[in-house]
Image (tube, rainbow, N blue to C red):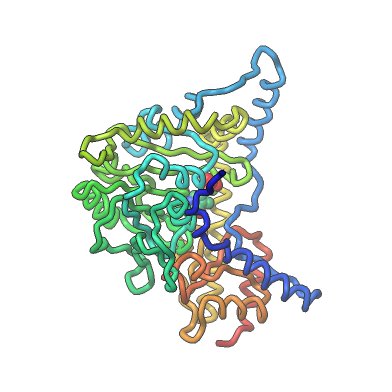
Amino acid sequence: MAYVNENYLKLPGSYLFSEIAKRVGAYQAANPDKKIIRLGIGDVTLPLPPACTEAMHLAVSEMADKKTFRGYGPEQGYKFLTEKIAENDYAKRGISIDTDEIFVSDGSKSDTGNIGDIFGVDNIIAVTDPVYPVYVDTNVMGGRSGTLGEDGRWSKIVYIPCTAENSFIPEIPKEKIDILYLCFPNNPTGTTITKTELKKWVDYARENRVIILYDAAYEAYISEEDVAHSIYEIDGAKEVAIEFRSFSKNAGFTGTRCAFAVVPKGLFAYTKSGEKVEVNRLWNRRHTTKFNGVPYIIQRGAEAVYSEAGQAQIKEMIGFYMENARIIREGVKAINLTAFGGVNAPYIWLKTPEEYTSWQFFDKFLNEANVVGTPGVGFGPSGEGYFRLTAFGDRESTVEAMERLLTLKF
Ligand SMILES: *Cc1c(COP(=O)(O)O)cnc(C)c1O
């Protein structure tokens, strides 16, 4: 008889996006003439930078020729790409990362989800709240969650609230933790923390042998000086942090798939009997066993992100989205709502007025302005009373959405 991994049975259905689709569908069916603007999506809309598609076209031609055809590549990624990453993302910021500390993958969703494979089931996991749901759900699958309470919290997971009350700066928890997920700039709140604040976490991790899983998917959107682009800008972080980076949001690779994880060689975890184990060795074993590499064509596209033309093109794309973010921030201020984020990330996190829950606010935006956002509570209990808008839309609909907001009364 075959048995299932019963941890999967603990997972509630993905309520958030199906419920949004249900409500939007019902509204549209009842009001077929209304044009709904979607500012809820967490996906890019601009096409790939020409530098990337040109490189990919060339690579396709190489694959069509017996002399230049390639089959399996190195599971960890081609050197032409890992060398560019080491040079541009790290050496240029004064950080020394070897190419064998870099693991090219098909996405940060996979990486942040898969990394749990190499950590014991007894680790206490901590997440900031609200949070990117992948971190929590994959720990449920891995048996580290305990049970789901009425309050939306898993019994064994430590939740670190990030709300307007603490300026979205996570405070070190009183409970003992072993592994901590941090994402800065943050999805969903669009906020981030300074290098000084990040250093507190690195110091804490070093003192307590905690490993930080640092998701820097929005690094390219940072506009302020005092914000780290990589956690390794903080002294000592290479002893305690694994960093996840992706080409999805900086270069529009959400449908193309390429990312990387950095697992420094001086980073250790421990056996029950207290022996040190190099995490890089375990991740290399896991990655090379369960993954056969990102397609050559795609890695050539990712390499082109680092070319002069590629850098100029991604800068322009990010500038476009961040101008949308500015328009949304202004639009929200114009109706006297408080907005956070949108300065170092393409997300704007609204505080709903006192009398509205996240879902009530969602309904008001949908029914009265025909604008769709994402209810904050869908990202965790501390997201209640917040609402996320994204800057990934086109200019025209972003501007129109803000004009429509002016008609709302609270
Ligand atoms: C979009 C996003 C990613 C990137 O995921 P990919 O799988 O690389 O597309 C990672 N983390 C967060 C928080 C994100 O929002």
Is residue 339 or residue 285 the one in the foreground?
285
Q: Residue at x 22, y 35 (%)?
A: 275
Left or right: residue 45 versus residue 246 is right
Left or right: residue 239 versus residue 51 is left
Relative image position of residue 115 (x, y in whole percent) = 42, 42
- Quadrant where the N terminus sits is top right
Classify 101 as above or below 389.
Answer: above
Residue 12 visible in image: yes
Left or right: residue 410 versus residue 162 is right
Residue 218 visible in image: no
- Disc tally is 0
Residue farthest to the left? 207
Q: Residue at x 33, y 48 (%)?
A: 212
Classify 54 as above or below 235.
Answer: above
Relative image position of residue 12 (x, y in whole percent) = 53, 63
Q: Residue at x 36, y 28 (%)?
A: 98
Displayed quadrant of residue 34: bottom right
Relative image position of residue 374 (x, y in whole percent) = 56, 68
Residue farthest to the front? 1
- Quadrant where the C terminus sits is bottom right
Classify 353 as above or below 279.
Answer: below
Residue farthest to the right? 33
Relative image position of residue 319 (x, y in whole percent) = 54, 53
